[in-house]
Image (cartoon, helix red, strand yellow):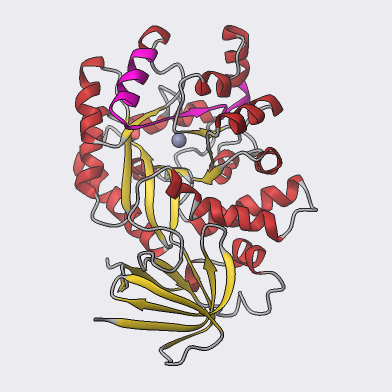
Amino acid sequence: MGKLVLYNATILEGEELDEARGYLVVRDDVIEKIGVGMPRNRGVDLKRGFVLPPFVNAHTHVADSIAKELYLKKTQPEVVGPRGAKFRALKGPKSQLIRAIRSVLLDMLCTGTLAHCDFREGGLAGVRVLQKAGGALPKSVILGRSSKWAELSRLLRACDGLGLPSLDAIRARALKEVVREVLGANKILAMHAAETAEANAASIRVTKKSEVRRALELHPSFVVHATWASEDDLVALHRADTPVVFCARANSLLGVGVPPIRRALGYGVRFCLGTDNVAVSQPDMFSELSFAWACLRRADSRVGGEEARALLRAATVEPLKIFDLPWSAVQEGARATFLALSRRNNLLDLTETYAGLVNRARAGNLRAIFVNGKRFKPSD
Ligand SMILES: [Zn+2]
């Protein structure tokens, strides 16, 4: 039996990421004990470093990494709209797409992300491309899309669900049927909603309903963006217990706005974090957290450690309620899958742990990734 003791650590324990200063005992692939203070038998000294659950990036489009920075001098519709530049880039050779996706997945691992949820373009063939590029980790939760009704059943069998680019991607009459099929197959249904002010205003003008309202009528597993969610929309999201995936950096880089993270916290809306198009922003959850933290502080300078903790939860444990992943929060009896961060120079002398981590931690602090009790090394 393999036993490993990590001591002199700040462990972010359980669903709430409660701070426990002490040690952690791993036996085989399970966390056997989390203790306060010093263990009887010393093991690896983490030198006051941190143990926390792995990052889960709840929204990506990894294939458009084939054309990084293609958004320059373009508006959001010109980049990712139905006839946007990214769709021209995605028409490149499959071998190039696979190479680009592999490099992105590896970069995610090197920045502590062990799972991501991808809105994969290109129907069933597009799903297959990501499946071919991926390995065991990071785990790719793939939501496909298809404009062909005949393909939908096969698509759903091949991947984890349907990720709609917009509420208008499928004609209203067919949409209900599609939703029934997805939910009947027990798969994930998600969609972009209220990313831009213009599209949300058009929705209200034409249908008398906001995009978030229309999305909620479909009973999705989650919605992506909600950048332009109104107070009523946030109340409705809370009532429906439907999580939002905020993508703060992508929203800013595409010039569409700042997600209402502060207001979502106020209304008790559940949320996760995603990095959206890799053509626009690198899927690095450390960067996403620090940018989201700056957005939160910009909205309200009274926010403190509890709000920072909520962000950290959004990047780690909150997505575990949506996606079926083979790990849980860091707690006794759980699989020993977690990140170990060193303090190095940037995390010394923190007066508050959660705010310090979201504001300053970076990939260089990643000392080790443990997967099922074994040290995992991403390799090129
Ligand atoms: Zn997206």
63 on left or right of 307: left
Q: Position of residue 305 (x, y in %)?
A: 70, 61
Q: Give whichever of 80, 28 is nearer the camera.
A: 28
- Residue 230 highlighted magenta (yes or no): no
Quarter of the image holding residue 162? Answer: top left
Looking at the image, how many numbered discs can be counted on the residues?
0
| Quarter of the C terminus within the rendering | bottom left
Q: Looking at the image, is 204 positioned above or below residue 137?
A: above
Q: Give whichever of 374, 281 is nearer the camera.
A: 374
Q: Position of residue 63 (x, y in %)?
A: 33, 42
| Quarter of the N terminus within the rendering | bottom left
Q: Looking at the image, is 143 positioned above or below residue 140?
A: above
Toward the bottom, the furthest residue is 41
Visible residue check, residue 93: no
Q: Position of residue 148 (x, y in %)?
A: 26, 17
Q: Which residues are magenta?
A: 175-198
